[in-house]
């Protein structure tokens, strides 16, 4: 199994630009989580899906952030417009049963 | 609310033991433990379920005190490969999503 796949691995963009992060969960996993990690705030849950349906998006910072999961094998996290304070490592994780979570390699986002 | 981890950092010599603690103010359904090495993603180590069985690795064990809403991770005879940041993640009540602690940085020296 290839594990959770995220793209891009690194993204550098300018303030105000739209950023789209992508995630392919492990096949057969029915839960998908988006996390953000920074030195100041640690590892924060942004949103999670179960069976492609968003269950809890209370961690999404503001309306500039949106996430979709159009099917069981793909999810996106979009930031529009991006700001320097959005700079962080964004992880996607999937789980078969709300127990063990398998994290992807992460996307390191830098907003200039 | 974020669980509280202690200590924030610990330095060991190879072969020594370590204990990392995690406490929550909420009634917990489960406690997860993950290890993250620098520049890498967190990797699952252990899960403890309320009233359930314990899962995890051979040389790393954990306990879950449901009355105190506390969990401890025990690393015995530490190896160089144990170095990294350890996070506990807690699921409270009926919620199944995790809230992670701020992490404990473990360094094992030869």
Image (spheres, coloured by chain):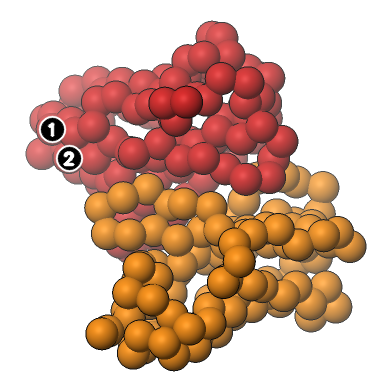
Chain colours: A red, B orange
* Residue behind mark 1: A12
Within the image, what quadrant is residue A27 found in?
Answer: top right
Instruction: Let me know if marks 2 and 1 both belong to one chain.
Output: yes
User: At 63% from the left edge and 21% from the top edge, which residue is drawn?
Assistant: A28
Helix, strand or loop under label 2: strand
In the image, B18: left or right of B40? right
* Residue behind mark 2: A110
- The answer to whether residue B77 is above or below residue B82 is below
Helix, strand or loop under label 1: strand
- The answer to whether residue B63 is above or below residue A56 is below
Q: Judge by depth and name the residue closer to the eye, A41 or B17.
A: B17
Residue A2, position in %: x, y?
42, 26
For the C terminus of chain B, the image quarter is bottom left
| Labels 2 and 1: the sequence-earlier one | 1
Looking at the image, can residue B31 be seen? yes
Residue farthest to the top?
A70
User: At 61% from the left edge and 35% from the top edge, which residue is drawn?
Assistant: A95
- The answer to whether residue A85 is above or below residue A109 is below
């Amino acid at each position: 199994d290839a594990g959770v796949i995220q793209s891009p691995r690194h993204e550098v963009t300018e303030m105000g630009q739209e950023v789209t992060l992508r995630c392919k969960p492990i096949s057969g996993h029915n839960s998908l989580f988006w996390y953000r990690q920074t030195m100041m705030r640690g590892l924060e849950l942004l949103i999670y899906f179960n069976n492609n349906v968003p269950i809890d998006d209370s961690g999404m910072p503001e309306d500039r952030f949106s996430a979709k999961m159009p099917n069981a094998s793909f999810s996106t996290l979009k930031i529009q417009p991006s700001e320097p304070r959005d700079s962080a490592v964004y992880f996607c994780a999937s789980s078969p049963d709300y127990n063990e979570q398998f994290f992807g390699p992460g996307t390191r986002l830098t907003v200039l | 609310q974020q669980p509280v981890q202690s200590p924030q950092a610990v330095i060991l010599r190879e072969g020594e033991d370590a204990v990392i603690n995690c406490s929550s103010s909420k009634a917990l359904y489960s406690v997860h433990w993950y290890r993250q090495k620098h520049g890498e993603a967190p990797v699952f180590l252990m899960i403890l379920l309320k009233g359930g069985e314990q899962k995890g690795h051979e040389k790393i064990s954990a306990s879950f005190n449901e009355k105190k809403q506390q969990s401890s991770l025990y690393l015995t005879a530490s190896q160089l490969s144990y170095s990294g940041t350890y996070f506990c993640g807690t699921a409270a009540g009926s919620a199944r999503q995790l809230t992670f602690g701020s992490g404990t940085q473990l360094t094992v020296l030869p």
